[in-house]
Image (cartoon, rainbow, N blue to C red):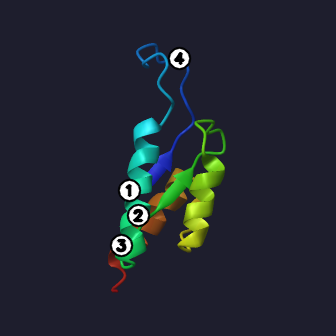
């Protein structure tokens, strides 16, 4: 499950010069790469409507390529992931 939240600019400890959600985007790329070879891997992806971390179009195009819905609500994403866990392959 990947949730790309809106950045909270009030957090002062955020490293200067580091892209927001950098690690999450890298990890999503790894998971999509695994899915290229192991199509049974199940992924849930969500992007907050106020997310401005970058690469949103790329995230959505990778999801579309693998027929993974992209949710704009954390609650709906969580519901989807629970359903994925309860569904037999």
- Residue 30 is tagged as 1
- CA distance separating discs 3 and 2: 10 Å
Could you say which is closer to the camera, residue 89 or residue 17? 17
Nearer mark to the viewer, of 1 and 3: 1
Residue found at the very far top of the displayed protein: 12
Q: Residue at x 51, y 52 (%)?
A: 74
Q: Residue at x 66, y 45 (%)?
A: 49
- CA distance separating discs 2 and 1: 5 Å
- CA distance separating discs 3 and 4: 36 Å
Relative placement, left or right, of 88 versus 4 is left
In which quadrant will I find the C terminus? bottom left
Q: Is residue 72 visible?
A: no
Tell me where residue 70 sits by quadrant: bottom right
Q: Residue at x 46, y 65 (%)?
A: 79
| Tag 3 residue | 41
In which quadrant will I find the N terminus? bottom left
- Residue 10 is tagged as 4
Nearer mark to the viewer, of 3 and 4: 3
- Residue 48 is tagged as none
| Mark closer to the chain start, 4 or 2 | 4
When the figure is inspected, residue 30 is found, relative to residue 88, above or below; the finding is above
Q: Position of residue 44 (x, y in %)?
A: 46, 63
Q: Are marks 3 and 4 in contact (CB under 8 Å)?
A: no
Q: Neighbour class for label 1 at 10 Å: few (<14), some, many (≥20)? A: few
- CA distance separating discs 1 and 4: 30 Å
């Amino acid at each position: 499950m990947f949730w790309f939240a809106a950045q909270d600019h009030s957090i002062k400890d955020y490293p200067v010069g580091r892209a927001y959600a950098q690690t999450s985007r890298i990890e999503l790329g790894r998971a999509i790469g695994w899915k290229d070879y192991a199509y049974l891997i199940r992924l849930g992806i969500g992007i907050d409507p106020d997310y401005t971390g970058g690469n949103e179009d790329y995230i959505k195009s990778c999801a579309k390529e693998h027929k993974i819905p992209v949710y704009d609500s954390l609650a709906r994403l969580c519901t989807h992931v629970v359903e994925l866990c309860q569904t037999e392959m």
